[in-house]
Amino acid sequence: MIYAAETYAGALLEQLAHSNIGRIPGTQVYIEIEIPDRLKIERIHGEDVAGWNSADMRASQTRGDAWLRSGASAVLIVPSAVTGGIESNVLISQTHPDFSSIHASAQRPVIWDPRLVRS
């Protein structure tokens, strides 16, 4: 499964939150993903899943795993816990038949502003 963010800024925040290194991550690249309008996209709202923002992430992982197993769609949009649900993350199933319709751009370097993490 591909775990992405809906925005570049959201991706940076997710990376900082999940890297747990207390500093700006090293050399990284990003891609832009194009999802055709014709593809079915499912969406989960945080209030639809009890415990969505729990620190142990059990509820969100359980719901995401169930979506992946169901094969109902190639794309699932979920609220970003890092942003309190204001932004969204995008889960993409690489095993879904529609995955081949999803395209990615060439890689580009991530430029980290050193002010994001101060020592």
Image (cartoon, grey):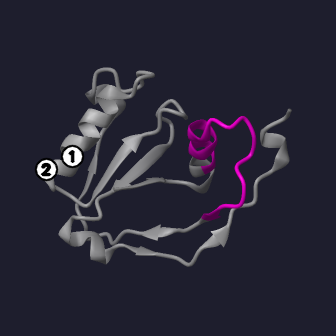
Count residues near mark 1 (Cα–Cα under 10 Å), then give few for <14, some for 14-19, many for 20+: some
Residue segment shown in magenta:
12-29
* Res. 38 image quadrant: bottom left
Task: Say whether residue 114 is left or right of residue 110.
Answer: right
Q: Is-magenta flag for residue 43? A: no
Q: Position of residue 9 (x, y in %)?
A: 63, 50
Q: Write down the quadrant of residue 21 in the picture.
A: top right
Identify the mark at residue 113; answer none if there is no mark: none
The correct choice, above or below, for 69 with respect to 75 in the image is above
Residue at image position (13%, 50%) is 70
Q: Quadrant of residue 56?
A: top left
What residue is shown with label 1?
Answer: 67
Q: What SS does tag 1 mark?
A: helix
**What type is the residue that disc 2 sits on?**
Ser
Rendered residue at 22%/61% (across/down):
40
Is residue 27 a member of the stretch shown in magenta? Answer: yes
Q: Position of residue 71 (x, y in %)?
A: 15, 56
Secondary structure, mark 2, is helix
Count of marks placed on residues: 2
Q: Quadrant of the C terminus?
A: top right
**In the rendering, which numbered label is found on residue 70?**
2
Q: Position of residue 36 (x, y in %)?
A: 33, 72
Amino acid, disc 1: Trp
Q: Are marks 2 and 1 in contact (CB under 8 Å)?
A: yes
